[in-house]
Image: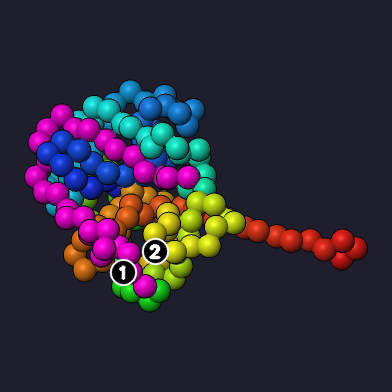
Protein backbone atom coordinates (compact mmCIF):
# COMPACT_ATOMS: atom_id res chain seq x y z
CA UNK A 1 0.00 0.00 0.00
CA UNK A 2 1.23 3.49 -0.84
CA UNK A 3 0.25 6.21 1.58
CA UNK A 4 0.23 9.87 0.66
CA UNK A 5 -1.90 12.92 1.13
CA UNK A 6 -3.99 15.01 -1.25
CA UNK A 7 -6.22 17.98 -0.60
CA UNK A 8 -9.37 19.18 -2.35
CA UNK A 9 -8.96 22.19 -4.61
CA UNK A 10 -12.17 21.79 -6.63
CA UNK A 11 -15.43 19.82 -6.74
CA UNK A 12 -13.69 16.68 -8.05
CA UNK A 13 -10.06 17.75 -8.02
CA UNK A 14 -7.29 17.04 -5.51
CA UNK A 15 -3.73 18.38 -5.42
CA UNK A 16 -0.78 16.21 -4.36
CA UNK A 17 2.83 15.49 -5.35
CA UNK A 18 3.92 14.19 -8.77
CA UNK A 19 5.71 11.29 -7.12
CA UNK A 20 2.30 10.24 -5.73
CA UNK A 21 0.50 10.55 -9.10
CA UNK A 22 3.28 8.49 -10.73
CA UNK A 23 2.31 5.54 -8.49
CA UNK A 24 -1.29 5.91 -9.68
CA UNK A 25 -0.16 5.78 -13.31
CA UNK A 26 2.14 2.79 -12.72
CA UNK A 27 5.29 4.78 -13.49
CA UNK A 28 7.11 3.58 -10.36
CA UNK A 29 7.12 -0.04 -11.53
CA UNK A 30 4.11 -0.91 -9.38
CA UNK A 31 0.96 -2.35 -10.98
CA UNK A 32 -2.03 -0.39 -9.69
CA UNK A 33 -5.49 -1.92 -9.93
CA UNK A 34 -7.61 0.45 -7.86
CA UNK A 35 -6.86 3.77 -6.21
CA UNK A 36 -9.05 5.32 -3.57
CA UNK A 37 -8.89 8.21 -1.20
CA UNK A 38 -10.05 7.89 2.38
CA UNK A 39 -11.48 11.14 3.70
CA UNK A 40 -10.06 12.45 6.95
CA UNK A 41 -12.48 12.50 9.85
CA UNK A 42 -15.21 10.46 8.13
CA UNK A 43 -13.49 7.45 6.57
CA UNK A 44 -15.58 7.95 3.41
CA UNK A 45 -13.98 6.15 0.46
CA UNK A 46 -13.60 8.28 -2.66
CA UNK A 47 -12.76 6.48 -5.91
CA UNK A 48 -9.95 8.22 -7.78
CA UNK A 49 -10.32 8.11 -11.55
CA UNK A 50 -7.27 9.78 -13.04
CA UNK A 51 -3.90 11.20 -12.10
CA UNK A 52 -2.03 13.96 -13.89
CA UNK A 53 1.64 14.67 -13.29
CA UNK A 54 3.19 18.07 -14.01
CA UNK A 55 4.65 17.79 -17.53
CA UNK A 56 8.06 19.10 -16.38
CA UNK A 57 8.45 16.66 -13.49
CA UNK A 58 11.59 14.58 -14.10
CA UNK A 59 11.72 12.54 -10.89
CA UNK A 60 13.83 15.11 -9.02
CA UNK A 61 11.60 17.02 -6.58
CA UNK A 62 14.24 19.70 -6.02
CA UNK A 63 15.00 20.06 -9.73
CA UNK A 64 11.48 19.92 -11.18
CA UNK A 65 7.84 20.63 -10.19
CA UNK A 66 6.77 17.81 -7.84
CA UNK A 67 3.05 18.52 -8.19
CA UNK A 68 0.17 16.48 -9.53
CA UNK A 69 -3.61 16.31 -9.67
CA UNK A 70 -6.09 13.54 -8.94
CA UNK A 71 -9.70 13.48 -10.12
CA UNK A 72 -12.41 11.84 -8.05
CA UNK A 73 -15.66 10.13 -8.96
CA UNK A 74 -17.52 11.90 -6.16
CA UNK A 75 -17.95 15.57 -5.41
CA UNK A 76 -15.53 16.57 -2.67
CA UNK A 77 -16.85 18.45 0.37
CA UNK A 78 -14.31 21.16 1.18
CA UNK A 79 -11.63 23.03 -0.69
CA UNK A 80 -8.80 24.97 0.83
CA UNK A 81 -8.25 28.60 -0.18
CA UNK A 82 -5.04 29.44 -2.04
CA UNK A 83 -2.80 32.33 -1.09
CA UNK A 84 -2.55 35.04 -3.73
CA UNK A 85 0.70 35.64 -5.63
CA UNK A 86 1.25 38.76 -3.50
CA UNK A 87 0.79 36.74 -0.29
CA UNK A 88 3.25 34.07 -1.43
CA UNK A 89 5.76 36.71 -2.60
CA UNK A 90 5.61 38.35 0.82
CA UNK A 91 6.71 35.17 2.66
CA UNK A 92 9.97 35.52 4.60
CA UNK A 93 12.42 33.24 6.37
CA UNK A 94 11.06 32.34 9.80
CA UNK A 95 7.39 32.66 8.80
CA UNK A 96 5.26 29.94 10.33
CA UNK A 97 3.73 27.15 8.25
CA UNK A 98 1.40 24.24 8.99
CA UNK A 99 1.58 20.91 7.21
CA UNK A 100 -1.81 19.16 7.28
CA UNK A 101 -1.53 15.52 6.27
CA UNK A 102 -0.95 11.92 7.22
CA UNK A 103 2.43 10.92 8.65
CA UNK A 104 3.74 7.66 7.23
CA UNK A 105 4.09 6.12 10.69
CA UNK A 106 0.27 5.99 10.88
CA UNK A 107 0.45 3.12 8.39
CA UNK A 108 2.80 1.21 10.71
CA UNK A 109 0.68 1.75 13.83
CA UNK A 110 -2.74 0.99 12.36
CA UNK A 111 -3.77 -0.66 9.13
CA UNK A 112 -5.63 1.71 6.84
CA UNK A 113 -8.70 -0.17 5.63
CA UNK A 114 -10.74 1.91 3.16
CA UNK A 115 -14.35 2.10 4.33
CA UNK A 116 -13.49 0.91 7.84
CA UNK A 117 -10.62 3.02 9.17
CA UNK A 118 -11.25 6.70 9.85
CA UNK A 119 -7.92 8.50 9.37
CA UNK A 120 -7.31 11.74 11.23
CA UNK A 121 -5.17 14.43 9.67
CA UNK A 122 -2.24 15.74 11.66
CA UNK A 123 -1.20 19.38 11.70
CA UNK A 124 2.55 19.84 11.98
CA UNK A 125 4.09 23.26 12.69
CA UNK A 126 7.35 24.73 11.53
CA UNK A 127 9.03 27.73 10.00
CA UNK A 128 10.28 28.57 6.53
CA UNK A 129 14.04 28.02 6.45
CA UNK A 130 14.93 28.66 2.78
CA UNK A 131 13.60 29.52 -0.64
CA UNK A 132 14.96 27.58 -3.64
CA UNK A 133 14.79 27.56 -7.41
CA UNK A 134 14.79 24.30 -9.39
CA UNK A 135 18.07 25.44 -10.92
CA UNK A 136 20.93 25.49 -8.41
CA UNK A 137 22.82 28.20 -10.34
CA UNK A 138 20.00 30.78 -10.10
CA UNK A 139 19.86 33.50 -7.43
CA UNK A 140 16.49 33.05 -5.71
CA UNK A 141 14.05 35.96 -5.53
CA UNK A 142 10.39 36.19 -4.55
CA UNK A 143 9.59 36.04 -8.29
CA UNK A 144 11.40 32.76 -9.03
CA UNK A 145 10.95 30.63 -5.91
CA UNK A 146 10.11 27.04 -6.86
CA UNK A 147 10.59 25.31 -3.48
CA UNK A 148 9.80 26.52 0.03
CA UNK A 149 12.00 24.68 2.51
CA UNK A 150 10.75 24.31 6.07
CA UNK A 151 11.65 22.48 9.24
CA UNK A 152 8.24 21.09 10.19
CA UNK A 153 8.63 17.41 11.10
CA UNK A 154 7.38 15.28 8.22
CA UNK A 155 7.50 11.68 7.06
CA UNK A 156 6.73 10.13 3.66
CA UNK A 157 2.97 9.90 4.40
CA UNK A 158 2.78 13.68 4.47
CA UNK A 159 3.88 13.92 0.84
CA UNK A 160 1.20 15.88 -0.99
CA UNK A 161 -0.05 17.65 2.14
CA UNK A 162 -1.15 21.24 1.99
CA UNK A 163 1.49 23.65 3.28
CA UNK A 164 -0.53 26.45 4.84
CA UNK A 165 0.39 29.96 5.98
CA UNK A 166 -2.26 32.19 7.61
CA UNK A 167 -5.02 29.74 6.65
CA UNK A 168 -4.18 29.62 2.94
CA UNK A 169 -2.34 27.04 0.83
CA UNK A 170 1.11 28.17 -0.29
CA UNK A 171 2.51 24.84 -1.56
CA UNK A 172 2.21 21.05 -1.69
CA UNK A 173 4.59 19.43 0.78
CA UNK A 174 7.24 16.90 -0.29
CA UNK A 175 8.11 14.82 2.76
CA UNK A 176 10.78 12.53 1.42
CA UNK A 177 13.37 14.65 -0.35
CA UNK A 178 16.87 13.89 0.76
CA UNK A 179 19.81 15.39 -1.05
CA UNK A 180 23.36 14.84 0.11
CA UNK A 181 26.22 16.72 -1.46
CA UNK A 182 29.74 15.55 -0.66
CA UNK A 183 32.81 17.32 -2.01
CA UNK A 184 36.07 15.35 -1.89
CA UNK A 185 39.34 17.20 -2.22
CA UNK A 186 42.13 15.56 -4.20
CA UNK A 187 44.63 13.74 -2.01
CA UNK A 188 42.46 13.79 1.13
Vertical relation: 101 (above or below) 73? below
**Picture quadrant where residue 4 is located:** top left
Please provide percent x and percent y for residue 101. 28, 55
**Res. 81 mark:** none
Disc with the residue nearer the chain's start (2 vs 1): 1
Say which residue appears at 19% left-offset and 64% top-offset.
167
Please provide percent x and percent y for residue 26. 42, 27
Q: Along the line of sight, which residue is nearer the eye, 162 or 94? A: 94
In space, the residues marked 2 and 1 are separated at their CA atoms by 8 Å
- Residue under label 2: 142
Magenta residue span: 64-92
Q: Main secondary structure of the magenta part?
A: loop
Determine if residue 125 is in view.
no
Please provide percent x and percent y for residue 109. 34, 53
Please provide percent x and percent y for residue 142. 39, 64
Looking at the image, which residue sits at the far bottom?
94
Vertical relation: 126 (above or below) 134? below
Determine if residue 12 is in view.
yes
Amino acid sequence: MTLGTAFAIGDRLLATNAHITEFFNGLQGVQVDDVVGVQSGTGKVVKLLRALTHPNYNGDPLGSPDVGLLTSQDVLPVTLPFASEAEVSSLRLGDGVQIAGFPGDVNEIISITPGTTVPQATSLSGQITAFRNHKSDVAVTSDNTDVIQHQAPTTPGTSGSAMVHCGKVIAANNAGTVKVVVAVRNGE
